[in-house]
Image (cartoon, rainbow, N blue to C red):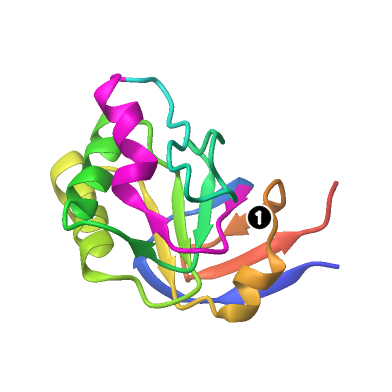
Amino acid sequence: MQREFKGRVIAPGCYRGEAVVSRQGVNTLATFQSSVLKNAKEVIVADQNNPDIFGLNITGKALCLPMTIGSTTGGMVIQTVCQMGIAPTAFLFSEHIDSLAASGIVLAKVWENSAVICIDQLGKEFIETVKTGDLIEVKEDGTVNILDKE
């Protein structure tokens, strides 16, 4: 059965693909720093304190999360992975986006012409329902569908 959620659009776009889910806050520095420093071609999550996503490739996928946590470098790190072309295609927040993540996503859009998508306020039920590996669809109006396996 398909499930539909509606959030607030921060950065519009369309996506159909795989979800990667963290049920806890995502530390942007710990998640992305290793891949950035190695000038990697993809982001393999390096945050050992996040067992939901540690070791997973999140490049080109929809990162579903409640919020970001961590240092004030969060926005810069998001903007950097967007510039490098190794960011998740979409950041889907169940809660309100924080100002640091929002700044990184907006700067990536403006400075890097990034196609990164961001939707927030999808709700607690969204983060409780979506699972890593689910096929999801994101629409420009902030609708996120968890699709049935094909």
Residue plotted at (45% across, 52% down): 90
Residue 123: image quadrant is bottom right
Front residue of 132/92: it is: 132
Picture layout, residue 22 above or below residue 142: above
Q: Specify whether residue 25 is painted magenta.
A: yes
On screen, residue 2 versus residue 126, left or right, reads right
> Residue drawn at (28%, 20%), measured in percent from left and top?
39
Q: Residues within 10 Å of mark 1 (few under 14, many from 20)?
A: many
Res. 67 image quadrant: bottom left
Residue 49 shown in magenta? no
Q: Is residue 29 above or below residue 64?
A: above
Residue 66 placed where, x, y %?
A: 48, 68
- 150 with respect to 126 (left or right): right
Q: Residue at the far front: name it.
A: 49
Is 128 above or below relative to 86?
Answer: below
Which amino acid type is marked by label 1? Ile
Location of the N terminus (image quadrant): bottom right
Please tell me how many numbered marks the rendered image carries.
1
The spot of residue 89 in percent (x, y) is: 45, 44
* Of the pair 86 and 32, the residue shown nearer to us: 32
Q: Which residue is mark 1?
A: 136
Q: Residue at x 43, y 26 (%)?
A: 42
| Magenta extent | 19-39
Q: Residue at x 56, y 45 (%)?
A: 53
**Tag 1, which secondary structure?**
strand
Q: Is residue 83 left or right of residue 125?
A: left
Where residue 83 sits: x, y (%)?
24, 34
9 relative position to 6: left or right? left
> Eyeballing the image, is 55 above or below 111?
above
